[in-house]
Every structure is written in structure tokens, then in C-alpha cells.
Image (spheres, rainbow, N blue to C red):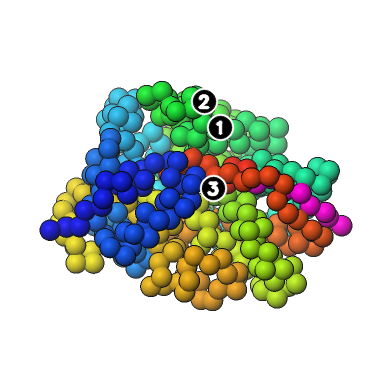
Amino acid sequence: MAAQVPREIANAIVDPKAYADGGRIDAALRWLRRHAPLARAEPDHYRPFWVVTRHDDILEVERRSDVFRAGDTFTTLTSIADSAHIMTVTDGSPRLLRQLLQMDGTEHAVHRRLTQGWFMPQKLSRLEARIRVLARHHVDRMAGSGGHCDFVQDVALHYPLALILELLGVPAEDAPLLQRLSGEVLGSSDPDLSRNRTPNGAEGAAIAGHQAAVAELMSYFAQLSAARQKMPGDDLTSLLTRATIDGDPLGELELLSYCIAFVCAGFTTSCTLAGALWALLDHPDQMTKLQDGNVPLDSMIEESLRWVTPVKHLMRSAAADTEVAGVKIAEGDWLLLSFPSGNRDDRVFDEPFRFNIARTPNRQQAFGAGPHLCLGRHLGHLQMRLFWEELLGRLAAIEWDGVPRNMEANYVCGPKSVPVRFKVH
Ligand code: HEM
């Protein structure tokens, strides 16, 4: 008989609060890796799914994308009630948007190819000077805050998004609006970020807030795309507006979804930067090593990706009866890939609960794998490297100035407050 995830652990996996209290989710996933690495969960209010917790099994499911499909049902954890709500809005489709993350096979490859060139190292090297200006500007902003700030709210949320908005051709004055909307999309289960701020969530409030924020982003990019139709620029929105697939223009839903995916993607880099600073403040020996220049920045960034793992899960569904790690999976079954779990797997990482900026090798899987491997991984990495170069070049001292807090979310999340006191040159 297939292993069953204990009810308490199944409920923790879907509970946004368990991710805010990192210890609770870590303990749940550690137990699963050891006792039931690929087991069936039946949490309250969700349809059952398999939880894949080991690094190698996650890689296998990601790579066998012909069997484990992304686009046939919900790509992220969605309760039975929220699924029903979405399907009434979309006429039966399990998604509000149609992003790359929700496509399979040739359709996915063709859509991905439209923008892939923009995110490859060669193109990015031409953006490096501009990214450095933005990194310096955000370090200046931190320096100008009188020696203390909330690193998340004052710096990390703004910096990665600034460049992405430039790439999309969004005017700088709209940055606050898009930042708020992306926070409402990804933070719909967090009482401080949700559009419908109801502390313990009136029934349906979170999904309604999520949906309203998505609708507002769609209408924003529909207007921008219409403007670019008339007067194209050298930006991603213009590229997608003029793009064709087999001679037909890109569908409107696909176009708007693409733009929204980029806006929301900036959040993952923000989470990783803020989570890295949190970890460095909690591990002063690692901060000293970094400041002394004893460890390459790239290695610290890989470890912060492993440590933070801002994308907490993605779902797949089985297109046929099959088997993974000796466990039989039936056609139609739903599977959860737990990236934070893979990144703490002691079969792959020595002392996985130690933040070790010199870790080599580091096979972190924060960017996923297989055909959906993060398109923006080189950009995210470059943005982080340039930011750390600029910050470390000026930082004389830094320490906690309050209690840090994490977001309450089970999909993409990280710190929502990292209060610090510091001195810069
Ligand atoms: C620290 C930063 C980032 C992390 C941790 C991250 C993580 C991820 C993960 C886990 C996936 C899913 C991979 C899978 O299904 O196997 C993904 C996909 C994606 N990411 Fe990122 N991401 C980051 C930054 C970015 C940035 C900066 C962009 C672009 C501006 C971006 C754009 C995308 C896109 C378009 C996809 C969908 C790819 C596909 O389905 O083919 N990401 N990312």
C-alpha cells in the first residue's frame, strides 16, 4: 500500500502560516523525506495529491514532462472551494492565466522561445551596466535612510522589479502600482499583503483578492500592449504584441499572462536577497567570511537560493499510469514538487540545515529543472551579484533592528520584514 502523509503534516503543507514559521514546515518535510518520501496527502479542503520530497525524485518528475504535465490541471495548490471559484470565472478552465508554467510540449517550447534570447547570458552582459546603476541607486537609497531600514520594504522589493519593468517598457511612475499588484497576487493569503485584508480570511476572500489583482494587471498590460501596437518600442511588451506563432498573433490571454509572469518573477529575486541578508545576520561567521572576500559571491548566492527557495512548490498531473521511486502513480493523479524539501535533502547536501556560503558542490534546485527550468535564472543571479558587490563595497557594519518576519503563503514567498541598523561608507 502507498505511504500516507499523516494528516497533521498534510495540513501543514497547504497552510500558508506553516511557511511563515519556517521551523514548522522544515520539520514536516524532514519527517517526510525520512519516513515517506513519496506519499499521498489528503489535507482538509483539498483534493488528494502525492508529495515528492527527495531531490532526485523531484528532478525525475520534472524531466519526465511527457508524463508529468503542467497544463492539465492546477499548477499550484488550490483548495476545492477556490478551484470551483476559478472555474466559474473561467468557464471551466483550471487557470486565470496561461503562462509558460501552465503549458506542455511543443506549445510550451514555442512560447518559451519567443523571449528566451532576452534572458541568455550574452544579452544580459549588455544589460550589466544598467543593472549596476540600479543596484547602486538602491544601495544609495538604503544609505539615505538614516542608518536603519526595513530591507524588504525599502530595498529588496523595489530593486529587481525596477529592471524587469524597464525591460517590459513600463513607465517608472507605474512601478508602485505594479509592485503592489504583484504582492497582492502572490501574497493573497497573507493578511498584510492581501487585497482583502481580513486577518483570518473570510471564506473566499483570498482567492477573490488574488483574482481582482490579476484582473487589474491584465487590464494594465492590455492597455500597454495596445499602445505598443500603435507605436512599438524596443521592449518585451512590444515584442510579445508583434509576436506570431505559425503566422497567427500570440493569443491575448497568453500575451498578458507572459507580461504578468515577468512582473511576478521579480518577487522571487527580492525574496532571495532578503532571505540571504536574514541568514547572514543570523550567522555572523558567514557574514565575516563574505566581507573578508574569502568566498566567491556566486557561491554565496547559490547557497542563499538553496536556503531561501522562494518557490515552495509546483504541481504536476500524471498523463498515464506510471511509477516513481517504486511508487505507483495513476493517470490523473496530482503531484506536489516540494523544492524547499529537495534543497534540504541530506542525500545530496552535507549538513543541509547549515547555512554555508562556501558550499561546493551546491546542486540547489530553487530554479526547478527540466523544460520549465527558470527562464530568468541568469538575470536573477546577475541582479543579486551586482547588488551584493555594491552593498558589500560600502557596508561598514550591520545588525538586527527588530524581529524579522516571513510572508504567509505556500507558493512563492520569503521575508516580509527584515529590520536592520547599519553603517555605510
Ligand atoms: C531568485 C530568483 C528566481 C527563482 C528562485 C526562480 C524560480 C523559478 C522556478 C522554481 C520556476 C519553475 C521551474 C520548474 O517548473 O521547474 C521558474 C520559472 C520561471 N521563471 Fe523564475 N525564478 C527566479 C527569477 C526569475 C526572473 C528574474 C525571471 C524573469 C524576469 C523569471 C522568469 C521565469 C519564467 C518566465 C518561468 C517559467 C519558465 C517555463 O515554464 O518555461 N524568474 N522560476
Q: Amino acid at mark 1?
A: Asp
Report whether 369 appears left or right of 379: left
Name of the residue lying farthest toward the left = 1
Q: Which residues are magenta?
A: 418-425
Q: Which mark is residue 231?
A: none
Q: Is residue 421 magenta?
A: yes
For the residue pair 381 and 403, the one nearer the viewer reads as: 403
Q: Residue at x 55, y 44 (%)?
A: 406
The local secondary structure at tag 2 comes to loop
Q: Which mark is residue 414?
A: 3
* Marks 1 and 2 close (CB-CB < 8 Å): yes
- Residue at numbered disc 2: 197
The reply to whether residue 128 is visible in this rendering is: no
**Disc 3 or 1, which lies upstream in sequence?**
1
**Disc 3 or 2, which lies upstream in sequence?**
2
Q: Residues within 10 Å of mark 2 (few under 14, many from 20)?
A: some
Give the x, y percent position of residue 124: 63, 59
Q: Residue at x 62, y 46 (%)?
A: 404
In the rendered image, which quarter contains the N terminus? bottom left
Give the x, y percent position of residue 285: 67, 68
**Disc 1 or 2, which lies upstream in sequence?**
1
The local secondary structure at tag 1 comes to loop
Measured in 3D between alpha carbons, the distance from the residue under mark 3 to the one under mark 2, in whole angstroms, is: 19 Å
Q: Amino acid at mark 2?
A: Arg
Give the x, y percent position of residue 351: 48, 71
Report whether 240 appears left or right of 38: right
Q: Which mark is residue 192?
A: 1
